[in-house]
Image (tube, rainbow, N blue to C red):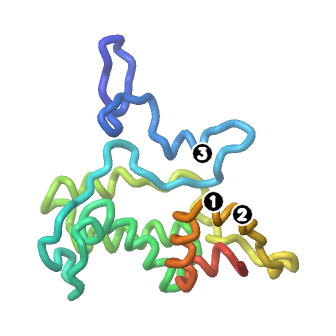
Amino acid sequence: MMATTLDEPFMWTYGFPVPECFAWHLVKKNNGGSIASLGNTGLGYGAVGNHGDIDGDGIDQPDTLERLGGYQIRMFYEEIDDGEDILGKVWAQTINKYLDTFPGMDYQADAKTAEQWPLLGDPSLKIGGYRTEDSSKSINIDNNFLESHPLILKILEIIKDRPIFKILFYKI
């Protein structure tokens, strides 16, 4: 937190001082906030370029996926793809994997990356919820909506075979 000239606390987020982080705004909303949120509490770090296999997994990917916040988010989805479906466990295992790969005491940006990504909300939540009799029904998405939003359609085509997609969208 930094103090402004008015001596009020603000966080420095994407170059602008704001009173609270975006993730907290999602959770704290009265009569309708989210039940959980993950997100940077300040200015998140990322990497650009391609400097080889930075994370040491034998696969050379763009640095944005192998370093800092991008790597952390990739690990989050890989935990879900590996079958974990409890939000708090996914979050904790993601942070642990990050710090196992990039120890926070070796580079301050790694410590900050792990620390600035709290889980705000109930860690016992099951990702995708619990199946009920009605959960086997198909989700209907209006074709007119998809035709008018080609980017959403492209994203759906890319992720449709990933386990996380099948968890969140039972049938489309």
Q: Are marks 2 and 1 in contact (CB under 8 Å)?
A: yes
Q: Position of residue 73 (x, y in %)?
A: 39, 66
Q: Identity of the amino acid at label 2?
A: Asn
Is 6 left, or right, of 91 in this rendering?
A: left
Residue hosting label 1: 148
Q: Which label belongs to residue 27?
A: 3
Distance of mark 1 from mark 3, alpha carbons? 30 Å
User: In the depicted view, which residue is nearer to us: 43 or 2?
Assistant: 43
Q: Look at 27% across and 65% down and name the residue there.
A: 64
Mark 1 lies on a secondary structure that is: helix
Quadrant including the C terminus: bottom right
Residue hosting label 2: 144
Is 44 left, or right, of 159 in this rendering?
A: left
Q: Examine the rendered structure and indicate whether residue 25 appears above or below residue 37.
A: above
Q: Identity of the amino acid at label 1?
A: Ser
**Which of labels 1 and 3 is toward the front?**
1
Q: Are marks 1 and 3 in contact (CB under 8 Å)?
A: no
Q: Look at 55% across and 67% down and name the residue there.
A: 87
Distance of mark 3 from mark 2, alpha carbons? 32 Å
Residue 16 occupies which quadrant of the picture? top left
User: In the depicted view, which residue is nearer to us: 44 or 95?
Assistant: 44
Determine crowd level at label 2: few under 14, some 14-19, many 20+ residues with C-alpha closer than 10 A.
few
Q: Look at 61% across and 57% down and name the residue there.
A: 122
**Which of labels 3 and 2 is toward the front?**
2
Distance of mark 2 from mark 1, alpha carbons? 6 Å
The numbered mark, 3 or 2, whose residue comes first in the sequence reads 3
Q: Position of residue 148 (x, y in %)?
A: 63, 59
Farthest right residue in view: 133
Q: Look at 60% across and 45% down and name the residue there.
A: 27
Mark 2 lies on a secondary structure that is: helix
User: In the depicted view, which residue is nearer to us: 152 or 94?
Assistant: 152
Q: Position of residue 26 (x, y in %)?
A: 58, 44
